[in-house]
Amino acid sequence: MENQLDIKCIDQTEFDGLEKEWNQLLARSSADNVFLRWEWMHTWWDVFRKNRRLLVITARSDGKLAAIAPFYIDRSGPLRTKTLRFCSDELCPDYLDIIAEKAHESEAVNAICAFLQKDHRNDWDMMALENLRSDSKLPANPMLLNHHNHHTQHSFVCSYIKINGSFDNYWSARPSLRSELSRQQRKLFNEKRIRHVPIRDEQILAKAMEDLFFLHAKRVKDKNIVSRFTAADVRRFHQTLAPALLKNGILNLHLIYHGDSPVSAIYCFNYNNKVYFFQSGFDPHWGKRSVGSVLLRLVIREAFEKRFEEFDFLKGDEGYKTFWTNASRRESELIIYNQTFRGAFGHAMKIMKARIRHLTNIREDSGAPVGLEKAIGAPRHP
């Protein structure tokens, strides 16, 4: 990058008009994935912006967009700590990062980090950069790490299918439940007359999304688990985003119907020759017939037939993923504490909690009674 980078924080108007340049840069970057698309980030900001400050940073070289840092500032906690985060954190996205030209990624990341360190050092107390892609340059960036206390760790495991060869070969290598699931699929289609409906038409998209939320809510209630996917703001995000993704050939939504009643749904994104499996739902009354697994098998088969490179199940350690996947990658988390009162306090609390966990583990290992964590309200760590 021969020219000096022109770096600045953009305002709402500039963010609104950046779609084409943003997505073109993303396609030229090594961070290219669906969760860093302009549509995803911009829709998130429209829905979740309340009481937050936009801090999207752009870097240009001779007028051409060379890097984007999709950040915002959140103020929370009793001290109103100013925390810098990636946009879209409520949605549990994966593989987040600064977006930069492949050939100049290190230079652009260094310049943006220096900009945060020098020009905007009073705008943040902490950086909580979660769900970082495995090859991000941020966890080793000297512009921030050499000047601040920090903490880096691996976080979530993302399991995926590395697609190679035919679906039949992939399926034959999975003997566990293979014959039973194939039998269930035949019975569902031949005896129960279910219909598999891939959503390709915007006219039926709104109802299909409602059916997805309905089925997810039924599954959550039946399994007695917690999920924000059907919360009003999250629903509004996906209902707003889905038409744009469908228009761009990214939305990959499949449902199974029995008559007019939805019984299973899978919500994926097709992007950059990968399928991202984001969410699902099914009617528990059909659970014994494996409607969720049958639909997943159909969607995975389609990924093989279309010659995608991966079918990514994203983060989460759900046991069912071991049946389907053959590879995995780790995300990381980077926490940086600024040299402000709130930043120093946050770092001190991090150290104290770590020491308490260490002491608690020692006392448990020795068989001594444990009471320290109760005294200060810290959780048990068995």
Image (cartoon, rainbow, N blue to C red):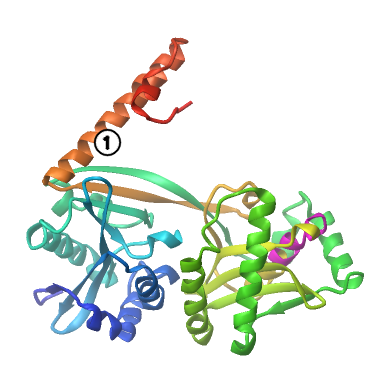
Identified at 62% across, 52% down, the residue is: 321
Q: Is 37 placed above or below 223 here?
A: below
Q: Which region is colored magenta?
A: 286-296
Compared with 146, 8 (above or below) is: below
Q: Is residue 14 above or below residue 75?
A: below
Main SS type for the magenta part?
A: helix
* Left or right of 163 on screen, residue 136: left
Q: Secondary structure at mark 1?
A: helix
Residue 30 place in picture, x, y as percent: 35, 68
Residue 211 relative to residue 310: left or right? right
Residue drawn at (90%, 72%) of the image: 190
Q: Which residue occupies the foreground of this view, 50 or 136?
A: 50
Location of residue 306 by image quarter: bottom right
Quarter in which the N terminus is drawn? bottom left
Identity of the amino acid at label 1? Lys
Residue for point 62% across, 74% down: 210
Residue 88 visible to an observer of this rendering: yes
| Rendered image quadrant of residue 114 | bottom left
Which residue position holds label 1? 350
Tell me if residue 210 is in the magenta stretch: no
Q: Residues within 10 Å of mark 1 (few under 14, many from 20)?
A: few
Q: Position of residue 283 (x, y in %)?
A: 74, 62
Q: Horizontal placement of 220 versus 105: left or right?
A: right
Q: Residue 290 colored magenta?
A: yes
Answer with the quarter of the image where residue 101 lies. Answer: bottom left
Q: x, y (%) of residue 213?
A: 61, 68
Residue 273 shows in the view:
no
Of 168 and 148, the residue lying toward us: 148
